[in-house]
Amino acid sequence: MYKNILVAVDGSEPSDQALTKAIDLANHHNASLVINHVIDARSFPVMAGSHQQELWNQYNKTAEDLLEKSKRKAEASGLKQIQTVLRNGNPRFEIPEKITKEYNIDLLIVGESGRNAAERMIIGSITEACMRRSPCDVLTVKNETSATLYRNILVAVDGSEQSEQALAKAIKLAEVHEATLTIAHVSEWGTFAKDIAFYQQSYAAEVQKDAENMLKKYKEQAEAQGFKDAQTILRAGNPRLEIPRVLTVENNIDLLITAETGQHAVSRFFTGSVAESSVRRSPCDVITMKKEQAT
Protein backbone atom coordinates (compact mmCIF):
# COMPACT_ATOMS: atom_id res chain seq x y z
CA MET A 1 0.00 0.00 0.00
CA TYR A 2 2.70 2.47 1.04
CA LYS A 3 6.01 2.31 -0.88
CA ASN A 4 8.00 5.35 0.24
CA ILE A 5 7.72 6.50 3.86
CA LEU A 6 9.19 9.69 5.32
CA VAL A 7 9.58 10.28 9.05
CA ALA A 8 10.61 13.60 10.58
CA VAL A 9 12.81 13.38 13.69
CA ASP A 10 14.06 16.00 16.12
CA GLY A 11 15.26 13.99 19.11
CA SER A 12 12.09 14.49 21.17
CA GLU A 13 10.07 11.64 22.67
CA PRO A 14 7.16 12.12 20.20
CA SER A 15 9.56 11.94 17.25
CA ASP A 16 11.13 8.79 18.72
CA GLN A 17 7.64 7.24 18.80
CA ALA A 18 7.09 8.37 15.20
CA LEU A 19 10.40 6.77 14.17
CA THR A 20 9.45 3.47 15.80
CA LYS A 21 6.13 3.37 13.94
CA ALA A 22 7.78 4.41 10.69
CA ILE A 23 10.20 1.49 10.99
CA ASP A 24 7.34 -0.90 11.80
CA LEU A 25 5.28 0.26 8.85
CA ALA A 26 8.20 0.23 6.42
CA ASN A 27 8.91 -3.37 7.38
CA HIS A 28 5.22 -4.29 7.29
CA HIS A 29 4.66 -2.81 3.84
CA ASN A 30 8.13 -3.61 2.47
CA ALA A 31 8.62 0.12 1.86
CA SER A 32 11.67 2.36 1.70
CA LEU A 33 12.23 4.70 4.65
CA VAL A 34 13.55 8.26 4.53
CA ILE A 35 14.57 9.70 7.90
CA ASN A 36 14.73 13.48 7.89
CA HIS A 37 15.78 16.30 10.17
CA VAL A 38 15.52 19.99 9.29
CA ILE A 39 17.66 22.47 11.20
CA ASP A 40 15.36 25.44 11.76
CA ALA A 41 17.51 28.28 10.42
CA ARG A 42 15.18 30.87 11.95
CA SER A 43 16.21 29.86 15.46
CA PHE A 44 19.93 30.09 14.75
CA PRO A 45 21.42 32.99 16.71
CA VAL A 46 23.23 35.78 14.89
CA MET A 47 26.85 35.89 16.05
CA ALA A 48 30.03 37.43 14.76
CA GLY A 49 32.99 35.69 13.15
CA SER A 50 34.26 32.26 14.08
CA HIS A 51 31.79 31.86 16.97
CA GLN A 52 28.87 31.63 14.56
CA GLN A 53 30.65 29.02 12.43
CA GLU A 54 31.57 27.01 15.50
CA LEU A 55 27.99 27.01 16.74
CA TRP A 56 26.69 26.09 13.30
CA ASN A 57 29.11 23.15 13.18
CA GLN A 58 27.76 21.99 16.53
CA TYR A 59 24.19 22.18 15.24
CA ASN A 60 25.12 20.09 12.21
CA LYS A 61 27.07 17.54 14.24
CA THR A 62 24.13 17.06 16.63
CA ALA A 63 21.74 16.63 13.69
CA GLU A 64 24.07 14.19 11.92
CA ASP A 65 24.41 12.13 15.10
CA LEU A 66 20.62 12.06 15.49
CA LEU A 67 20.15 10.80 11.94
CA GLU A 68 22.89 8.20 12.30
CA LYS A 69 21.37 6.92 15.54
CA SER A 70 17.94 6.77 13.88
CA LYS A 71 19.37 4.88 10.90
CA ARG A 72 21.06 2.31 13.16
CA LYS A 73 17.72 1.74 14.91
CA ALA A 74 16.04 1.09 11.53
CA GLU A 75 18.86 -1.23 10.44
CA ALA A 76 18.59 -3.20 13.68
CA SER A 77 14.97 -4.01 12.78
CA GLY A 78 16.11 -5.65 9.54
CA LEU A 79 15.05 -2.78 7.28
CA LYS A 80 17.29 -2.45 4.21
CA GLN A 81 16.00 0.51 2.22
CA ILE A 82 16.97 3.50 4.39
CA GLN A 83 18.06 7.03 3.56
CA THR A 84 18.82 9.98 5.83
CA VAL A 85 18.28 13.58 4.76
CA LEU A 86 19.58 16.66 6.59
CA ARG A 87 18.33 20.07 5.51
CA ASN A 88 18.45 23.67 6.73
CA GLY A 89 15.41 25.95 6.57
CA ASN A 90 11.86 26.20 7.81
CA PRO A 91 10.67 22.66 8.65
CA ARG A 92 7.04 23.70 8.09
CA PHE A 93 7.84 24.07 4.39
CA GLU A 94 10.89 21.86 3.84
CA ILE A 95 9.29 18.66 5.14
CA PRO A 96 5.78 18.69 3.61
CA GLU A 97 6.37 20.73 0.46
CA LYS A 98 9.87 19.83 -0.71
CA ILE A 99 11.16 16.57 0.72
CA THR A 100 7.89 14.67 0.16
CA LYS A 101 8.03 15.55 -3.54
CA GLU A 102 11.77 14.98 -4.01
CA TYR A 103 11.55 11.44 -2.64
CA ASN A 104 8.12 10.55 -4.05
CA ILE A 105 6.75 10.00 -0.54
CA ASP A 106 3.28 8.47 -0.14
CA LEU A 107 3.19 8.48 3.69
CA LEU A 108 4.65 11.17 5.95
CA ILE A 109 4.91 10.27 9.65
CA VAL A 110 5.24 12.90 12.38
CA GLY A 111 5.00 12.99 16.15
CA GLU A 112 2.16 14.85 17.83
CA SER A 113 4.50 17.65 18.87
CA GLY A 114 8.24 18.22 18.97
CA ARG A 115 10.76 20.39 20.72
CA ASN A 116 8.92 23.62 19.94
CA ALA A 117 5.34 22.70 20.88
CA ALA A 118 4.84 26.11 22.50
CA GLU A 119 5.10 27.74 19.06
CA ARG A 120 1.62 26.43 18.25
CA MET A 121 0.26 29.54 19.93
CA ILE A 122 2.08 31.74 17.40
CA ILE A 123 2.77 30.08 14.07
CA GLY A 124 1.39 26.56 14.39
CA SER A 125 3.11 23.25 14.97
CA ILE A 126 5.19 21.40 12.40
CA THR A 127 2.68 18.57 12.66
CA GLU A 128 -0.26 20.73 11.63
CA ALA A 129 1.79 22.34 8.84
CA CYS A 130 2.58 18.87 7.49
CA MET A 131 -1.07 17.89 7.61
CA ARG A 132 -2.14 21.00 5.69
CA ARG A 133 0.69 21.21 3.13
CA SER A 134 1.76 17.65 2.42
CA PRO A 135 0.59 16.19 -0.92
CA CYS A 136 0.61 12.68 0.58
CA ASP A 137 -1.10 10.93 3.49
CA VAL A 138 0.08 12.01 6.94
CA LEU A 139 0.21 9.76 10.01
CA THR A 140 0.27 11.68 13.29
CA VAL A 141 1.58 9.43 16.05
CA LYS A 142 -0.15 9.79 19.41
CA ASN A 143 0.86 6.66 21.34
CA GLU A 144 3.49 3.96 21.64
CA THR A 145 1.47 1.04 20.30
CA SER A 146 3.33 -0.81 17.55
CA ALA A 147 2.21 0.25 14.08
CA THR A 148 1.83 -3.42 13.16
CA LEU A 149 -0.60 -3.91 16.04
CA TYR A 150 -3.48 -1.62 15.08
CA ARG A 151 -6.52 -3.54 16.22
CA ASN A 152 -9.46 -1.15 15.97
CA ILE A 153 -9.71 1.29 13.06
CA LEU A 154 -12.27 4.09 12.76
CA VAL A 155 -12.90 5.95 9.51
CA ALA A 156 -14.95 9.16 9.39
CA VAL A 157 -17.18 9.56 6.32
CA ASP A 158 -19.50 12.26 5.02
CA GLY A 159 -20.45 11.12 1.51
CA SER A 160 -17.78 13.18 -0.25
CA GLU A 161 -15.46 11.65 -2.86
CA GLN A 162 -12.50 12.17 -0.57
CA SER A 163 -14.12 10.42 2.39
CA GLU A 164 -14.94 7.48 0.11
CA GLN A 165 -11.24 7.28 -0.76
CA ALA A 166 -10.50 7.32 2.97
CA LEU A 167 -12.95 4.45 3.42
CA ALA A 168 -11.23 2.41 0.69
CA LYS A 169 -7.87 2.92 2.39
CA ALA A 170 -9.35 2.08 5.80
CA ILE A 171 -10.69 -1.21 4.44
CA LYS A 172 -7.25 -2.10 3.07
CA LEU A 173 -5.50 -1.20 6.32
CA ALA A 174 -8.03 -3.16 8.37
CA GLU A 175 -7.34 -6.20 6.18
CA VAL A 176 -3.55 -5.79 6.41
CA HIS A 177 -3.60 -5.38 10.19
CA GLU A 178 -6.45 -7.86 10.73
CA ALA A 179 -8.24 -5.09 12.64
CA THR A 180 -11.86 -4.27 13.32
CA LEU A 181 -13.36 -1.53 11.16
CA THR A 182 -15.86 1.09 12.31
CA ILE A 183 -17.41 3.43 9.72
CA ALA A 184 -18.82 6.55 11.37
CA HIS A 185 -20.80 9.59 10.29
CA VAL A 186 -21.75 12.49 12.56
CA SER A 187 -24.57 14.69 11.28
CA GLU A 188 -24.02 18.27 12.32
CA TRP A 189 -27.53 19.21 13.41
CA GLY A 190 -26.41 22.72 14.27
CA THR A 191 -26.37 23.57 10.57
CA PHE A 192 -30.12 23.06 10.20
CA ALA A 193 -32.55 25.99 9.93
CA LYS A 194 -33.83 26.99 13.37
CA ASP A 195 -36.42 29.59 12.50
CA ILE A 196 -39.07 27.19 11.14
CA ALA A 197 -39.59 24.26 13.50
CA PHE A 198 -41.52 22.11 11.05
CA TYR A 199 -38.95 22.57 8.28
CA GLN A 200 -36.14 21.78 10.71
CA GLN A 201 -37.81 18.54 11.82
CA SER A 202 -38.60 17.49 8.25
CA TYR A 203 -35.11 18.30 7.00
CA ALA A 204 -33.49 16.49 9.94
CA ALA A 205 -35.48 13.34 9.14
CA GLU A 206 -34.42 13.54 5.49
CA VAL A 207 -30.76 13.96 6.42
CA GLN A 208 -31.03 11.07 8.88
CA LYS A 209 -32.39 8.80 6.15
CA ASP A 210 -29.69 9.85 3.68
CA ALA A 211 -27.00 9.18 6.28
CA GLU A 212 -28.41 5.73 7.06
CA ASN A 213 -28.43 4.87 3.34
CA MET A 214 -24.86 6.13 2.97
CA LEU A 215 -23.60 3.98 5.83
CA LYS A 216 -25.48 0.96 4.53
CA LYS A 217 -23.82 1.40 1.13
CA TYR A 218 -20.38 1.74 2.71
CA LYS A 219 -20.89 -1.38 4.83
CA GLU A 220 -21.89 -3.30 1.70
CA GLN A 221 -18.79 -1.92 -0.03
CA ALA A 222 -16.59 -3.27 2.76
CA GLU A 223 -18.35 -6.65 2.58
CA ALA A 224 -17.89 -6.79 -1.19
CA GLN A 225 -14.14 -6.44 -0.60
CA GLY A 226 -14.20 -9.38 1.79
CA PHE A 227 -14.53 -7.47 5.05
CA LYS A 228 -17.53 -9.05 6.78
CA ASP A 229 -17.52 -7.50 10.25
CA ALA A 230 -17.60 -3.73 9.62
CA GLN A 231 -19.59 -1.72 12.17
CA THR A 232 -21.43 1.49 11.31
CA ILE A 233 -22.21 4.36 13.67
CA LEU A 234 -24.51 7.32 13.06
CA ARG A 235 -24.54 10.18 15.54
CA ALA A 236 -25.82 13.73 15.71
CA GLY A 237 -23.66 16.50 17.10
CA ASN A 238 -20.41 18.32 16.43
CA PRO A 239 -18.17 16.00 14.35
CA ARG A 240 -15.08 17.95 15.42
CA LEU A 241 -15.66 16.73 18.97
CA GLU A 242 -17.74 13.60 18.56
CA ILE A 243 -15.35 11.78 16.22
CA PRO A 244 -11.96 12.33 17.90
CA ARG A 245 -13.05 12.69 21.53
CA VAL A 246 -16.06 10.36 21.91
CA LEU A 247 -16.14 7.66 19.24
CA THR A 248 -12.44 6.84 19.54
CA VAL A 249 -12.80 6.24 23.29
CA GLU A 250 -16.12 4.38 23.15
CA ASN A 251 -14.81 1.95 20.54
CA ASN A 252 -11.25 1.57 21.86
CA ILE A 253 -9.85 2.93 18.58
CA ASP A 254 -6.09 2.96 18.01
CA LEU A 255 -6.13 4.37 14.46
CA LEU A 256 -8.47 7.10 13.19
CA ILE A 257 -8.62 7.81 9.44
CA THR A 258 -10.04 11.05 8.09
CA ALA A 259 -10.00 12.82 4.74
CA GLU A 260 -8.19 16.15 4.60
CA THR A 261 -11.40 17.91 3.58
CA GLY A 262 -14.89 16.64 2.96
CA GLN A 263 -18.39 17.76 2.19
CA HIS A 264 -18.13 20.97 4.19
CA ALA A 265 -14.57 22.12 3.53
CA VAL A 266 -15.59 25.80 3.60
CA SER A 267 -16.39 25.54 7.32
CA ARG A 268 -12.72 25.08 8.19
CA PHE A 269 -12.34 28.86 7.90
CA PHE A 270 -14.74 29.23 10.85
CA THR A 271 -14.55 26.22 13.14
CA GLY A 272 -11.71 24.09 11.79
CA SER A 273 -11.93 20.93 9.72
CA VAL A 274 -12.70 17.54 11.20
CA ALA A 275 -9.24 16.39 10.12
CA GLU A 276 -7.47 19.21 11.95
CA SER A 277 -9.62 18.70 15.03
CA SER A 278 -8.85 14.98 14.98
CA VAL A 279 -5.11 15.62 14.95
CA ARG A 280 -5.45 17.97 17.91
CA ARG A 281 -7.99 16.06 20.00
CA SER A 282 -7.77 12.35 19.24
CA PRO A 283 -6.03 10.17 21.86
CA CYS A 284 -5.02 7.67 19.15
CA ASP A 285 -2.95 7.79 15.98
CA VAL A 286 -4.52 9.70 13.07
CA ILE A 287 -4.04 9.26 9.33
CA THR A 288 -5.05 12.32 7.34
CA MET A 289 -5.67 11.07 3.82
CA LYS A 290 -5.02 13.37 0.90
CA LYS A 291 -7.05 13.37 -2.28
CA GLU A 292 -5.75 10.79 -4.72
CA GLN A 293 -4.73 12.18 -8.07
CA ALA A 294 -5.84 10.50 -11.28
CA THR A 295 -3.03 8.74 -13.11
Image: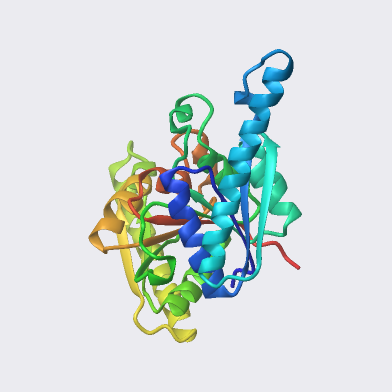
Instruction: Name the image quarter holding residue 285.
Output: bottom left
Front residue of 64/211: it is: 64
Task: Measuring from the top left, give residue 20's x and y in whole percent.
Answer: 46, 59
How many marks on residues? 0
| Residue 206: image location, x then y, percent | 37, 59
Q: Position of residue 96 (x, y in %)?
A: 64, 46
Residue at image point 33% right, 47% down: 189
Q: Depth check: give the residue in front, 91 or 252.
A: 91
**Quadrant housing the C terminus:** bottom right
At 64% from the left edge and 45% from the top edge, which residue is drawn? 95
Is 136 left, or right, of 172 in this rendering?
right
Dividing the picture into quarters, in which one does residue 253 lie?
bottom left
Q: Is residue 191 left or right of residue 162?
A: left
Q: Nearer the viewer, residue 25 or 16?
A: 16
Decide: is 183 above or below 143: below
Could one spot residue 107 in this view of the protein? yes
Tell me if 131 is positioned left or right of 238 in this view. right
Q: Residue furthest left?
A: 250
Scheme by which the image is coloured: rainbow
Quarter holding the N terminus? Answer: bottom right
Q: Is residue 91 above or below residue 162?
A: above
> Can residue 203 be seen from the camera position used here?
no
Q: Is residue 197 above or below residue 109?
A: above
Q: What residue lies at 34% left-to-right and 81% top-to-bottom?
A: 229
Image coordinates for residue 84, horizontal then vertical, percent: 66, 54
Q: Residue at x 50, y 39 (%)?
A: 268
